[in-house]
Image: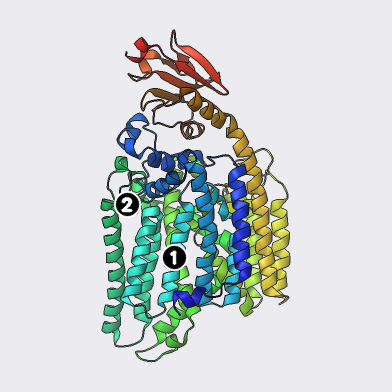
Amino acid sequence: MNLIRLFANVPRSLLAAVFVVFALLAMRVVTTGSPIMGSDEYAYFGTAKFADDAGTIFQFDPGMQAVGNKVYPLLYSGWESVSHQDAGSVGRLFNSLLFVLGAFVLYGIFARVFDRRSALYSAILYLLMPVSFYATTLLPEVEFQVSVYLVTLMVAMAGRKPSYRSIAAAAALSALSYLIKPHAAALICACGLYWFATGMLQREGALPRRLARAAGRAAWYFGLSAFFIMAITKLAPGNRAAGGDVVASFYRSYVERIFDVDFLLANLTGFVDYAGGHLWLLLALFAPGLVFVAASSGRLMGQAWRAKSGSSPVDEMPDSSYFALYVALLLLAFLAMIAIFTSSAGELSDFEKFRLHGRYLAPLLPLLLGCSVWAVAQRPGRLVPLLGLAALVAFVFVGRGLYKIFPWDYPDAFGLFGPSLHYWGFTGASTWTVWVILLAGILGYLAQACGVRARLSYMAFVLVVALASHTQMWRWLDFHVESNRSTVAAADAIETYLGDAPTGSGLVLTLDRYGQAPYLLMGLDHPQFVRAASNGQVVAAKDIPAGVRWIVAPQAAQLVVPDASERSFGNQRLYLLKQSQAND
């Protein structure tokens, strides 16, 4: 089945759903202030926006994260070519469009490995998932998610006997995914293992021949992936400040932990804890798909282990079993990556401990959803829905107290958050969303256990989870945007007042470099000096870099600059220095 045949006659209902959801996302872009995830968005957007000054950005602002992304500057160039003044809005609309187009890729995947009805239901439910939150930010999350879908589509199209051309195409797409976000290292590991597995599962020839075939496929994939990554890293413009490293400095400390045996042994319990927390939540939401993935991949490998050369039951296994194996490897690789990352971050801050970083699992959630929608229609019996129900009830009453769910980490599970959880909170949080999810889960899973419209019951449960999580996300977004509105307004007013301020002519003084400061910096049109001060610290003229002509500081900052003229812009103050002071 080629791509043209696969996507021929796409259902009109999916086309209509894509159009409606894009319109809704566009409305959210227009009505929701930007940035939302200030620090992360500024790290990407700022380095791309100031690419010509990349050599000085990190000198001016020591706190800027060196993400070293090679694809994002190209995206920004495209957004800026549409509108220089509103490149951010264009970028958010582009991300929204890309998100809804991802539904077609997912439809193609599920139509290939399952059936068209399951593919249609899954693609429409994907459009309703709160993971669309990332589409309204200026982060490359949606690009990363869709790149994973494209690799998965290539895997599905390649079948159980992939050609070297198909593997090469998957390698090129995997390299693109890695250059969008280095978290795709997990994707590359999983894909390489999958290609090895297909070589071993193909029962033609004796064991040495199968080993050679399996190793050849894996080596071809790993080698081409590495070649494409290194070639594009050296050739793509990227941002010069981040250099031409394959692994950006911002992520290098986490990657190095993978090879630190002492760290791995000391944190083994923590790894299992974090991976178990994610699996617990996934089982509560996607029990049919998770059990299908585990059972089918296990059965496939078991058949291969027991079979001899030549014709075997392995050859009779459906394509869905091979897809289950791929998803299982993908899930294990991403969970391992997340566990190592969270353990490393948790050592540095109590705030980071026990966070469920569903953001890094986002590309897998629609795949598990598709597996669940298909598997629940196969009448898996009573055990699976009862297992999902037990996981959901246990997580609501126990798991929510053990693990932290933040809106920017796990929008699809944020409906489970409530103000009774004391690790964090915000004004206006709903108290009822978790109980609606619990009720829907009880009814949905019990209906499946009783065989009453099993697929419809599960999809209704997924829909309730999505709507409840959307509601809690909307409440948080209103609170979050309102909390930063004065800083964003001050940044716009200061930028208008200063006009075309030369690079390095100003100093932005902040008491919170990764909190309020990025919202201010996003509004400035040229890179300036950034310095962080602690509460109560007095900043004097000697602390001001040479050549600075103006200073922006919070109202609460203690700044002593004699003879400077001063203007107030909301929660910020602007100090205009005399020429003699600027030349000191």
Residue to which mark 1 is pinned: 150
Q: Residue at x 35, y 91 (%)?
A: 310
Q: How is the image coloured?
A: rainbow
Residue 424, label in figure: none
Residue to which mark 2 is pinned: 260
Q: Is residue 224 above or below residue 573?
A: below
In the rendering, at what x and y percent does residue 366 appear? 54, 63
Residue most extreme to the top: 563
Is residue 359 found left or right of 577 in the rendered image?
A: right
Could you tell me how far apart the alpha carbons at marks 1 and 2 are, in whole angstroms?
33 Å
Name the residue nearer the viewer: 465 or 16: 16
In the rendering, at what x and y percent does residue 213 appear? 29, 79
In the rendering, at what x and y percent does residue 96 appear? 54, 53
- Amino acid type of disc 2? Asp
Residue most extreme to the front: 82
Mark 2, secondary structure of its residue? loop
Q: Is residue 497 above or below residue 562?
A: below
Q: Is residue 566 above or below residue 489?
A: above
**Residue 298 appears anywhere in the view:** no
Q: Which comes sooner in the sequence, label 1 or label 2?
A: 1
- Amino acid type of disc 1? Leu
Q: Quadrant of residue 396?
A: bottom right
Mark 1, secondary structure of its residue? helix
Q: Is residue 368 above or below residue 358?
A: below
